[in-house]
Amino acid sequence: MSRFATGVTVVTFQGDDGPRGATMNSFTSVSADPPLVLVSVAKRARSHDDLALRPFCVNILGAEQEPLARLFAGAQGLLEPRWVPGARVPRLANPLAWIECDPWRSYDGGDHTLVLGQVTDLGHRDGDALTYAWSRFGRAIECSEGIEHLI
Ligand SMILES: Cc1cc2nc3c(=O)[nH]c(=O)nc-3n(C[C@H](O)[C@H](O)[C@H](O)COP(=O)(O)O)c2cc1C
């Protein structure tokens, strides 16, 4: 699996004592109608029980946001995350993209739970993407041209 290059997200939600988040790269889009996305959450994660039941936001990280990925994966550090004030669902300030969701369905996935969310709002900015491959963080450079001209 480490040969499968992914982006990196922090999935955020309202915890009992304030905003919470967990780093996840199991994120994928699922459906356009209705708009659904998926994350696979370890049953042993502290976030597990809340994430299947509460609105959540998938924060797709930019290349310079590796410290946030480490922080929300449990690394100790002095970094204080910045949150967007007044958001319906807690979300980080200035991710590369954010996708706000209401919980839709959850499915058993062995030692993980597959959590599907219905997209309620989203936004994005320009910039390079944080990546994860070979168990290392990396960078995908923003391209001016995509495959739009091919499809
Ligand atoms: C790059 C990266 C990707 C990760 N992806 C996932 C994931 O998709 N699902 C998951 O449950 N944990 C994932 N983790 C591990 C969680 O971030 C880690 O267990 C975290 O401590 C969970 O926080 P919590 O226990 O507060 O919920 C990932 C960690 C890293 C560094």
Image: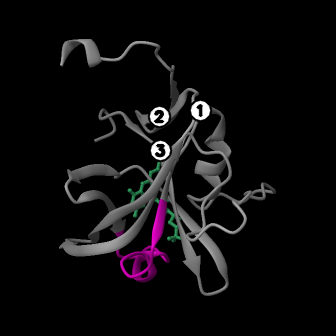
Residue bearing mark 3: 8
Residue bearing mark 2: 131
Direction from residue 126 to residue 7 in the image, left or right: left
Q: Alpha-carbon distance for marks 2 and 1? A: 7 Å
Quarter-of-image position of residue 67: top right
Q: Position of residue 111 (x, y in %)?
A: 26, 71
Direction from residue 46 to residue 119 in the image, left or right: left
Magenta stretch: give its range.
42-57
Q: Is residue 94 above or below residue 151?
A: below
The image's colour scheme reads one colour
Q: Alpha-carbon distance for marks 1 and 3? A: 9 Å
Q: Secondary structure at mark 1?
A: helix
Q: Amino acid at mark 2?
A: Thr
Tag 2–tag 1 contact (CB < 8 Å): yes
Tag 3–tag 2 contact (CB < 8 Å): yes
Q: Is mark 3 within 8 Å of ligand 1?
A: yes
Q: Secondary structure at mark 3?
A: loop
Quarter-of-image position of residue 81: bottom right
Quarter holding the N terminus?
A: top left
Residue bearing mark 1: 63
Quarter holding the C terminus?
A: top left
Q: Is residue 149 above or below residue 59?
A: above
The residue positioned 24% from the left and 75% from the top of the image is 106
Q: Position of residue 86 (x, y in %)?
A: 69, 69
Q: Position of residue 38 (x, y in %)?
A: 30, 59
